[in-house]
Amino acid sequence: MIPVNELVRGYRLYEEEYNEKAVSVLRSGWYILGKEVEAFEAEFAQALGEDCYCAGVDNGLNAIQLGLHACGIGPGDEVIVQANGYIATMLGITQNGGIPVFVEPDKYHNMDPDRIEAAITDKTKGVLVTHLYGQATRMEQIVAVCKKHNLMLFEDCAQSHFASYKGTNTGLFGDAGFFSFYPTKNLGCFGDGGGVVSRSKELIDKIKVLRNYGTDYKYHNIVPGFNSRLDEMQAGLLRVKLSHMGELLANRRKIAEAYLDGIHNPRIRMPEIVEGAVPIWYQFVINVEDQAGFRKYMLDHGVQTDVHFPTPPHLQPALAYLGHKEGDFPVAERDCKTVVSLPMMDYLSDDEIRTVIEVANAYEG
């Protein structure tokens, strides 16, 4: 069986380095907010781009929650988001008392820039785009809309580490970018982890205070804060993986290019790439009318698949209080019913890639 993802393969690629780093952290005697976190923050920020700063936190959701909180998003504030994707994006808004306002996605599964202005009200404070599946959103128009209406711009980059649009990495287009380092991510750790990036050092310094009980120095709490700290072990292991990102991204690009070149089945709609964008292929997502039937066919022929994500956030019970119903966002709803993720991970053998292509091409519906 070819798995849709197998995390241990990524570990085995650099097993000795990961082991050495883990032992080094254990022997250091310092396990929270130490030298490994500081080094990772600096290295990740430098890798993303010039004038970038980073605050490591405990997970991707809290990266969004703290980042929005630090930027002043509060009760009753509306933040425009896309109607597909994972609910964590919206929870980062609601946990601050804000209100997610949904707009439909485009054919690239990302926020449709043409639909934003119609969603703006006198309560709108910002736009939060999600660079879904590892492909950058069309940011040029979104940046212009935010400037025109004096809105803050945020980026959920949980799936887009080092994806770029017209030469700029995701996370650096607006006021703040939010990252998850969950183990499945292209830059994933071996537990939970997250980060906030910004070109504003003042904002990042504020988040560093908020993540540690509102503390600017030991036992001195200047604001009501949170417990959202990135630990030394995860930061150290992330540093190892970050040092190999070029090779890891090349591995995924090889898989994606093989799929794009090799799968030619009229029953499968292949992903399209935004002009000027360089995707990182967090997931390789196709669209198939018979989602369940296709997945069963693939599994019966030895290929595991997944669905990211089967239920749009506006139809999740947790957000029922917003009052949305089925049919409110038909583009997003239809997308959720037809998306299928093919195997994509840090390493697939040539034989495995070839098998996925052959089985997909033989699908007859």
Image (cartoon, rainbow, N blue to C red):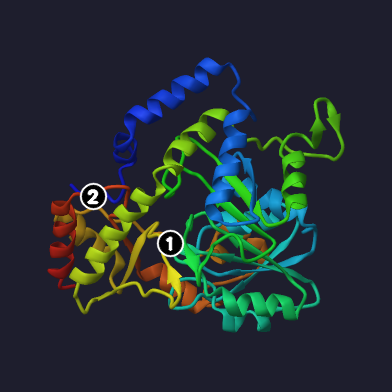
Question: In the rendered view, would you say 189 is above or below 113?
Answer: above
Q: Tell me where residue 210 sits by quadrant.
A: top right
Is residue 94 rendered to the left or right of residue 132? right
Picture coordinates of residue 355 (x, y %)? 14, 57
Q: CA distance from mark 2 to mark 1?
A: 18 Å
Q: Which residue is mark 1?
A: 133
Q: Which residue is mark 2?
A: 348
Is residue 54 rendered to the left or right of residue 136? right
Q: Is residue 230 visible?
A: no
Q: Secondary structure at mark 1?
A: helix
Picture coordinates of residue 245 (x, y %)? 41, 48
**In the rendered structure, which amino acid carries the disc numbered 2?**
Leu
Residue drawn at 51 percent across, 58 percent down? 86
Label 1 Cα neighbours within 10 Å, binned few <14 / some 14-19 / many ≥20: many
Question: In the rendered view, would you say 20 is above or below 316?
Answer: above
Question: In the rendered view, would you say 12 is above or below 150?
Answer: above
